[in-house]
Image: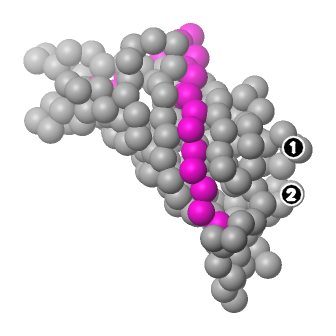
Amino acid sequence: MLVLAVIFCGFSKDSQRSKTGVTVPFKFEGVIITDHSSQTVCTPEGDPYPTIAHARSGWLQGNQSHGGRLITEQSTWTIFNCHTDFTSGINTSYIEGVNTVANGDSYSYTCIMLTNIVTMEVVLNVTVTDGTGRYDGATGQAVLTGFNTGGAGIPVNGWGSVTFNK
């Protein structure tokens, strides 16, 4: 199970100009696709803990209100660290990724994904860190939510904003 992401393009009537650039709100709907051949263990070692493992990497498929569809094969993510707190029932995964849009421009992001191991609710706190093309120097934040249904992917959606350089 994994990450997430977000994408932004263009400007809207809701955008706001500042000295640092233009901030644009966006909505994202998509699916986290996991590569089940890449596993990572996110639990303390030994008894009495059960093993909690999930995919270490995968792709993001989706659509957003300012930019359209992601190129799934070029929108990749990787978990670089994870752990599970059995007292709170929360699995925390730290993710890095890149999302690419139809014109080939892309942006990088980091993400903290919280998964409730009982209810399977997923919350992704995404931070856009930079990019190429129109995303060069872009920054932003988003919160995506969803449920891990145990199927082929994790449906997620949410809102955020991105600031483009002037």
Task: Please report contact status of discs 1 and 2: CB closer than 8 Å, yes or no.
Answer: yes
Q: Secondary structure at mark 2?
A: helix
Look at the picture and state if 161 lies above or below 74. Answer: below
The region drawn magenta spans 24-44
How was this image coloured? Answer: one colour
In this view, the residue in front, 159 or 130, is: 159
Q: Earlier in the sequence, mark 1 or mark 2?
A: 1
Q: Which mark is residue 133?
A: 2
Residue for point 65% across, 30% down: 61
Q: CA distance from mark 1 to mark 2?
A: 8 Å
Q: Looking at the rendering, in which quadrant would you find the C terminus? A: bottom right
Let me know if residue 78 appears in the view: no
> Magenta stretch: dominant SS?
strand
Residue 127 location (% of width, % of height): 54, 57
In the picture of the structure, the residue carrying the numbered disc 1 is: 104
Residue for point 52% across, 13% down: 152
> Is residue 105 shown left or right of residue 19?
right
Residue for point 45% across, 12% down: 151
Let me know if residue 160 appears in the view: yes
Residue 21 location (% of width, % of height): 72, 79
Look at the picture and state if 51 lies above or below 25. Answer: above
Residue 165 location (% of width, % of height): 76, 74
| Residue 81 among those drawn in magenta | no
> Is residue 125 shown left or right of residue 61?
left
Amino acid type of the residue tagged 2 in the rendering: Gly
Amino acid type of the residue tagged 1 in the rendering: Gly
